[in-house]
Amino acid sequence: MNSKSLLRFKAVDPEARLGLPTGKFSTPHPTTSFLGGCVVMGVIYGIALLGRNTGEFGAEAWRYLAGYQGFPIIMMVLASWSASILIIKGLKVRAQRRALAIHIVPSDPKFAVTSSTALKVVQVIESAVEDSRSFMYFNRIIVAMRSMRNVGRIGDIDEMLQSAAGNDEALAESGYTLLKGFVWAIPVLGFIGTVVGLTQAMGKFKVALDPVMNGGGSQDVQKVSQGLMQVLGGLDVAFVTTGESLILVFIIHIASVFVRSADEALLDDTREAAHENIAARVRIEPDSGA
């Protein structure tokens, strides 16, 4: 391998650059995404903690993040983890795109990929790219080129590339499994908060009305007022947790649309580049077992 590679995986992949576990291609590793979520959570709550004593807005923001019986904290854990997944995935997609800019076959239209030139293509890739199998594009090409001696017709290589493309698409889709689970869990937590809040409000409402039902005086009316304030507190938990969960899910969903679009574009461009540079140039030599 040349000392000066055109592309180094450890230099472009966000997980590898930090020395953390790396997921395959554009899929983040769960450990890395969790650590990223902790960082996001720490930043959000660190800023809120510093600002809670700076004024009414800071105190209210802290209450929405840490109050309401702790439901917002649990939802923010999942939302921060989701944000980390999307951020890392977006950076990994951009890193994978760097491979598409590397020319690994001659620009001469007469150049053909045969069993005798296939290994030369692999050598060019491995000399120009460090840890080339970590890039989706190069991994497809290397697997296909190493199988050139075992194919009997041109269509075999194209089928091999199409099969690899299908596997990569399934792998990319699996990278959203954890995110889908969080998008489902966050509103459920919000609805649980609603049930808890309403249950609490109904229980305090009965207690608040007891003095009135017993024909109490002015002091009892004051107790009723205080009891109704506690009822409103329970209703706050009910509606605020639901509202926060829906807002968080909405933000995550919108962000995931853009990241998924970039991911799908990478898959399409990789498929097209592999076909144009390899499948369309394959020629089966008579002595290759055709």
Image (cartoon, rainbow, N blue to C red):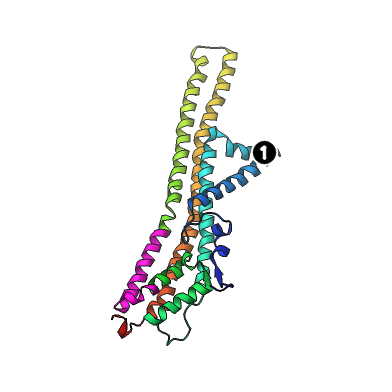
| Quadrant of residue 192 within the rendered picture | top left
Q: Which residues are magenta?
A: 145-171
61 versus 285 height, above or below: above
Residue visible at 41% across and 69% down in the picture: 140
Residue 208 at x, y percent in the picture: 52, 20
Residue visible at 68% across and 41% down in the picture: 50
Residue count near mark 1 (Cα–Cα under 10 Å), binned few <14, some 14–19, many ≥20? some
Given residues 53 and 207, the one toward you in this image is: 53
Q: Is residue 222 magenta?
A: no
- Mark 1: secondary structure: loop
Q: Is residue 157 magenta?
A: yes
Spot the residue most to the right. Answer: 54
Q: Main secondary structure of the magenta part?
A: helix
Residue visible at 48% across and 20% down in the picture: 206
Residue visible at 55% across and 19% down in the picture: 224
Q: Quadrant of the C terminus?
A: bottom left
Residue 38 at x, y percent in the picture: 56, 46
Left or right for 42, reference 266 = right
Residue 143 at x, y percent in the picture: 39, 70
119 versus 41 height, above or below: below
Name the residue carrying label 1.
52
The residue type indicated by label 1 comes to Arg
